[in-house]
């Protein structure tokens, strides 16, 4: 097994499988993406998702809203999409402009169409084993870890994250495989002690080169979620890749690691939602 975890190759394989599934099952998945404002990174991400959807056979609907629009207008668009029987899945491109209440906007989505799985009801259902619908970010990271073919039983996992809400599903996925998982804030004064004991280290600190070699256990699996632009030209992760590469047993690059898998999981979850009750109700109306 290569030390480099090639997220791009894995994502392309998943997307090809989804394309074949859509054809075989004669599905007509529809994804609506709401982008508020003109953040350049968000626009790039939306275009990547649009391209991937077209390649897989998923109808892509863009709702581009000005940054100076009101929160009521954004909520109105979401309400419209909630009621549109042709839309299977809704994605709110994050981050939203600072003036918006992100939690309120996410909660406005119908849980049945929340493709990211970030709605509190969806997270709670997954954590309490009431639903098998896995939030895409966590599922993508988990698939990258599983691709190493390492036995996760009795492994120590540490997830560095500013907010645990997006990473609790990942913790559950790892725990279900027999790993012990801790979510640590980047400002934790004991962060180095915790990370240096981790067999699996997931970095989502939001700071370039936050994870240095002395924070990483020998032969650890290292997953870098970070995407940081420096000098307006280079995109780097939260991990000091060149230094940590020497110590890790497996490591994701940036770009080419978690990013492509996040897009693949968006497509995967869109197809899952297209197979659900909403599709059946739509078919009954025809």
Image: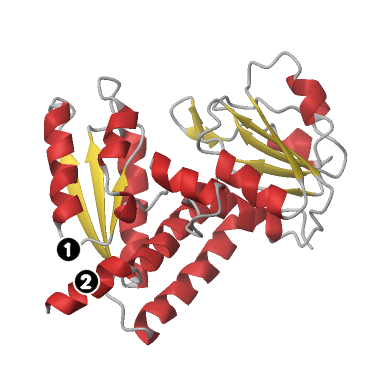
**Which residue is at the front of the view, 3 or 27?**
27
Give the vertical position of 82 relative to 85 (above or below): above
Give the vertical position of 281 relative to 217 (above or below): below
Does residue 12 appear left or right of residue 5 in this picture?
Answer: left
Instruction: Point out residue 46 in the picture as x, y percentages from the top left corner.
Output: 32, 48
Q: Does residue 256 show up?
A: no
Q: For the C terminus, give its image quadrant.
A: bottom left
Q: What residue is rendered at 33% in x and 49% in y? A: 111
Q: Check disc 1 and report the residue beneath it.
A: 85
Q: Secondary structure at mark 1?
A: loop
Q: Check disc 2 and report the residue beneath it.
A: 281
Give residue 183's quadrant in the image.
Answer: top right
Does residue 245 appear left or right of residue 23 in this picture?
Answer: right
Give residue 281's quadrant in the image.
Answer: bottom left
Q: Secondary structure at mark 2?
A: helix
Does residue 285 appear left or right of residue 161 in this picture?
Answer: left
Specify the farthest residue to the top: 189
**Disc 2: CA contacts within 10 A as few (<14), some (14-19) or many (>=20):** few
Q: For the N terminus, give its image quadrant.
A: bottom right
């Amino acid at each position: 097994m290569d030390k480099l975890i090639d997220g791009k190759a894995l994502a392309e394989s998943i997307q090809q499988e989804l394309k074949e599934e859509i054809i075989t099952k004669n599905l007509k998945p529809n994804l609506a993406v709401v982008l508020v404002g003109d953040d350049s990174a968000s626009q790039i991400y939306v275009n990547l998702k649009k391209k991937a959807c077209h390649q897989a056979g998923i109808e892509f609907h863009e709702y581009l809203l000005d940054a100076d629009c009101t929160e009521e207008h954004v909520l109105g668009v979401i309400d419209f999409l909630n009621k549109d029987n042709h839309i299977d899945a809704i994605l709110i491109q994050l981050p939203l402009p600072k003036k918006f209440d992100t939690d309120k906007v996410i909660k406005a989505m119908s849980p049945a169409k929340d493709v990211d799985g970030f709605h509190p009801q969806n997270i709670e259902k997954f954590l309490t084993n009431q639903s098998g619908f896995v939030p895409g970010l966590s599922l993508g990271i988990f698939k990258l870890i599983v691709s190493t073919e390492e036995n996760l039983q009795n492994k120590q996992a540490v997830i560095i994250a500013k907010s645990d809400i997006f990473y609790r599903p990942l913790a559950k996925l790892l725990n279900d495989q027999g790993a012990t998982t801790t979510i640590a804030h980047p400002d934790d004064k004991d962060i180095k002690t915790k990370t240096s004991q981790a067999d699996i280290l997931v970095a989502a600190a939001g700071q370039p080169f936050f994870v240095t070699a002395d924070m990483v256990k020998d032969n650890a699996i290292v997953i870098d979620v970070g995407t940081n632009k420096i000098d307006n030209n280079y995109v780097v992760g939260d991990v000091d890749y060149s230094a940590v590469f020497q110590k890790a047993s497996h490591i994701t690059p940036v770009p080419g690691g978690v990013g492509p898998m996040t897009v693949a999981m968006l497509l995967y979850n869109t197809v899952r939602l297209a197979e659900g009750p909403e599709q059946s109700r739509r078919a009954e109306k025809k």
